[in-house]
Amino acid sequence: MDMSRLKDAIDLAGRVLIAALFIWDGWGITQDYGGAADYLTQHGVPGFALPMALALQLGGGALVIVGWWTRLAALGLAGFCLSTALIFHSDFSDFNEQIHFWKDLAIAGGFLILAAHGAGGWALDARGRQAGI
């Protein structure tokens, strides 16, 4: 395998791994929507934000996996991770919350790198570049 194909395969694997978390979590929210809405309101987030968060998780995750509008989806998910860290995981007296805070920041960093560099060759975005779109 040449290095270009290896890079494209690694880009795809990275996109699937980072986005799978958000699709999995979004699916879980659909299974207990009321519980998720209660959790948000307990942290001062209005319930009307849940459908937007759910759309971002499921839609953004799917866009990242297929590599379509990848940079925009990655920026949205990076913002989601940063806000999640600050809103839900800022109790630094709890070591577990500290871990979640830093993991959210790390995932946001991964999405920022994806936003800066794009999805790679095995992506729908790349097909548009090849067609001159």
Image (cartoon, helix red, strand yellow):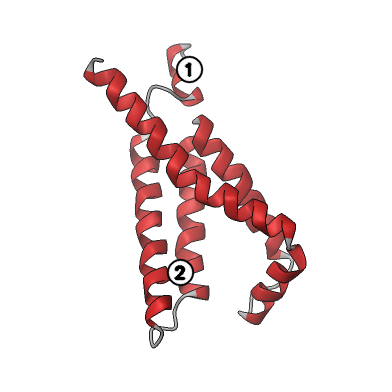
Residue at 44% in and 18% down: 129
Q: Which residue is mark 1?
A: 127
Q: Which residue is mark 2?
A: 85
Question: Mark 2: which secondary structure?
Answer: helix
Residue at 40% in and 70% down: 101
Residue 69 visible: no
Q: Is residue 72 above or below residue 55?
A: above
Task: Please name whichever residue, 86 or 39, is drawn nearer the observer in this view of the structure.
Answer: 39
Instruction: Using a 10 Å C-alpha cutoff, classify the residue at mark 1 as few (fewer than 14 neighbours), some (14 to 19) or many (20 or more).
Output: some
Relative to 89, 114 lies left or right: left
> Which label belongs to residue 3?
none
Image-quadrant location for residue 109: bottom left
- The amino acid type, in three-letter code, at marker 2 is Ala
Q: Quadrant of the N terminus?
A: top left
Task: Please name whichever residue, 74 or 62, is drawn nearer the observer in this view of the structure.
Answer: 62
Relative to 33, 115 lies left or right: left
Residue 19 visible: yes
Question: Mark 1: which secondary structure?
Answer: helix
- The amino acid type, in three-letter code, at marker 1 is Arg
Q: Earlier in the sequence, mark 2 or mark 1?
A: 2
Q: How many marks?
A: 2
